[in-house]
Every structure is written in structure tokens, then in C-alpha cells.
Amino acid sequence: MKSFLHVEDIGDLGKALQEARQVKENPFAWKELGKNKTIILIFFNSSLRTRLSSQKAALNLGIDPIVLNVGADSWKLESRLGVVMDGDSSEHLREAIPVIGSYCDIIGVRSFAGLKDREFDYAETILNQFIDYSGKPVISLESATVHPCQAFADLITIEEYKAKVRPKVVMTWAPHPRALPQAVPNSFAEWMNAADVDFVITHPEGYELDPLFVGNAKVEYDQMKALEGADFVYAKNWSCPGTVNPEDYGKVLSKDMDWIVDSKHMAVTNNAYFMHCLPVRRNMIVSDEVIDSPRSIVIPEAANRVVSAQVVMKRMLEEMK
Ligand code: SN0
């Protein structure tokens, strides 16, 4: 695996899920694989789960992790090509990336969408520079358009909790005070489309995700109707993807509190499990009652972030041998 962004990068999903089970049962079985190997984890944005679960996954495999917070711990890095660097960025990614690549064997990068320039974001301009100039395998730790480690962990969690072969999974937009990226819903849709689930997306009009990620998923604008009979409810806010009106890209179009996932919404489901990637705004995205209920699986979902990251790093190490 040269890089990890999309569901195709992991290959056969059945095999990946089987490997996830093995890694979870016996996390230290491959401790020799990462001996004398280093992973550098680069954060352009905040993180709790991704930062800790990626380090833990590396440690389980015997890999030495190094974490860099860009800007806070390093020079401020320029990412645009061909600009006169007379602003506050001291170094360009063109130099920083090959330098970082020379110090490690695998690179993980978190670089959120700027939500200003759709073309810049959807071209994965920053992550692709890491792929092109580092000479090392690159893992997206949520880049502009995808969050594959999260979606893989979500799939592992659904696999663990499902009570039927083909569960109904509903991803619902929910209100949030700030403009958030589309990476999490994009990846979740991409992975659910590839998995053996009945997948439905629901959101207010104007929040249509990029067709590249929606694929053949069913889109239902009536949230209550979408939630009927759901086995899993996956809540997430995202800002306007700009697929209908490009000038609305990255904007908050609605803060409609009717879209919160509360007991009224959960009542029409098939006693569904509640999922969210976290961090979550209580009583905006989800009511206390729902997230504190026994059907909320947000903590085991987050715990599986170690498993998904470990499978990805393990595959990369095995290809180096
Ligand atoms: C990020 C997002 O992409 O939605 C990371 C999720 C894994 N979430 C946020 O930035 C939430 C920030 C907030 O203020 O609630």
C-alpha cells in the first residue's frame, strides 16, 4: 500500500476485517515487524483520537512514532506552489516533505480542508505533495476530503455489533455551530458503499456530498423516513460541499435543531446503535439521553481506531520486507 486514502487502497474488505480481528485479538504479535522503523505523524490541525491511536498502533507494531505539530513546533509551512514567500510561512512543503521523508519509513498527515477553495481541497493538494515528494508511504489522518482510518474503524465496529447479515446504516447530517469539513462523511459513504450494508444518507437540501463519494447510496431528504428501521445511526455535521452552488462551498447553510439525534429520532429505528467519530457537541449533534444510552457505541468505535491504524501500518511494513 503506497498510500492510504480510499477504500480501494485496503483491497478486499473481507480480508481486511479478518486481519482487524486478528490484530485486535493479538495486538503485539507483529512487534518485530516494526523494529528500527519510524513513523512521523504530522498534524496541521488538532487531534485527540487520531494522534493517540496512531501512536499506540505504531507502538504495538514496534515502530517508533515521532509527532510534529506544524506551526506550533515547527516553521509555518507554505503549501501553495509558485507564490512569493513574503508572508509568515518560513518554509515550503517542497523542502520540508523530502526532509521529513528522509527521517522515517512511513508518514501520517492530518491536514483539514481549508473550506475556502473547493478545487484546492478536492485536489488533496497538501496530501498529494506528501505522496509525491516524500518517497515514503503516506497515511491520511484526515486530509481535505477523506478520513479513511476513521471509516475503516467504523466498519470494524459495525461488523462487531451487527445482528443481521445486511444491517441498515443511516448517516444523518446534524447541526453544529461551526463549518466542518466533509472528510468524515465522504469516507464513511465510500466505505459503506463498498460494504455489505443497506446504506442511506439524509441531510437538508444543499448539503449534497460529492457524487464521487455518494456513489449508489440512497439519499433521503426526510430524516425521519430515512431513520425508520435503522440498525445503526451515524451522526455527523458537515459544511456545504458546494456541489449544487459552488459559491456556497464551506458555508453553514442550516443550524436546524430539528436534525439533532434525540430520543424522538431513535424511536423510529430498529433500536439502533448510535455512532459518531468524536469529538461531538452534546445537545447540538446528539442529545445527552442518546449518547449516554446503552445503545451508544461511540467509545468502542473510538477504541477501534487503534485497530484500523494498526492494520494499515502492518500492511505497509509487510510490503517493505
Ligand atoms: C473534525 C471534522 O472533520 O469534522 C474532525 C473529526 C474527526 N471535527 C471538528 O473539527 C470538530 C470541531 C468542533 O469545534 O466541534
Image (tube, rainbow, N blue to C red):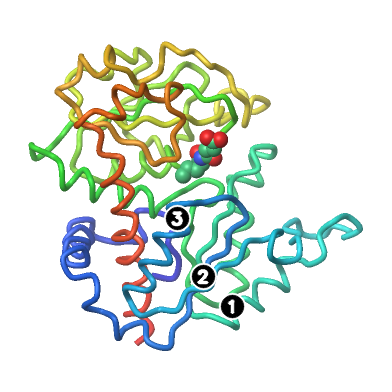
Image-based side of 49 in relation to 91, left or right: left
Q: Residue at x 40, y 79 (%)?
A: 63
Q: Position of residue 319 (x, y in %)?
A: 35, 80
Q: Is residue 35 above or below residue 282?
A: below
C-alpha gap between disc 3 and disc 2: 13 Å
In the image, residue 125 lies at what x, y percent?
A: 63, 55
Q: Seen from this angle, which residue lies furthest left? A: 164
Q: CA distance from mark 1 to mark 3?
A: 20 Å
Residue 183, visible in the rendered structure? no
Q: Quadrant of the C terminus?
A: bottom left
Q: Which residue is at 18% across, 29% downward?
A: 231
Under mark 3, the amino acid is: Thr
Q: Residue at x 57, y 50 (%)?
A: 46
Q: Amino acid at mark 1?
A: Gly
Mark earlier in primary sequence (3, 2): 3
User: Eyeballing the image, is 176 above or below 134?
Assistant: above
Instruction: Name the mark on residue 107.
Output: 2
Q: Are marks 1 and 3 in contact (CB under 8 Å)?
A: no
* Relative horizontal placement of residue 256, taking residue 265 as reference (left or right): right
In primary-sequence order, the first of circles 2 and 1 is: 1
Cβ–Cβ under 8 Å for marks 2 and 1:
yes
Label 2 crowding class (10 Å Cα cut-off): few <14, some 14-19, many 20+? many
Q: Name the residue that disc number 3 marks.
A: 50
Marked residue nearer the N-terminal end (1 or 3): 3
Q: Residue 310, position in %: x, y? A: 32, 66
Residue 175 in the image: above or below residue 216? above
Q: Is residue 272 above or below residue 277?
A: above
Residue at point 70%, 72% (across, down) = 96
Visible in this render: residue 81? Answer: yes
Classify residue 164 by image quadrant. Answer: top left
Where residue 101 is drawn, which disc sits there?
1
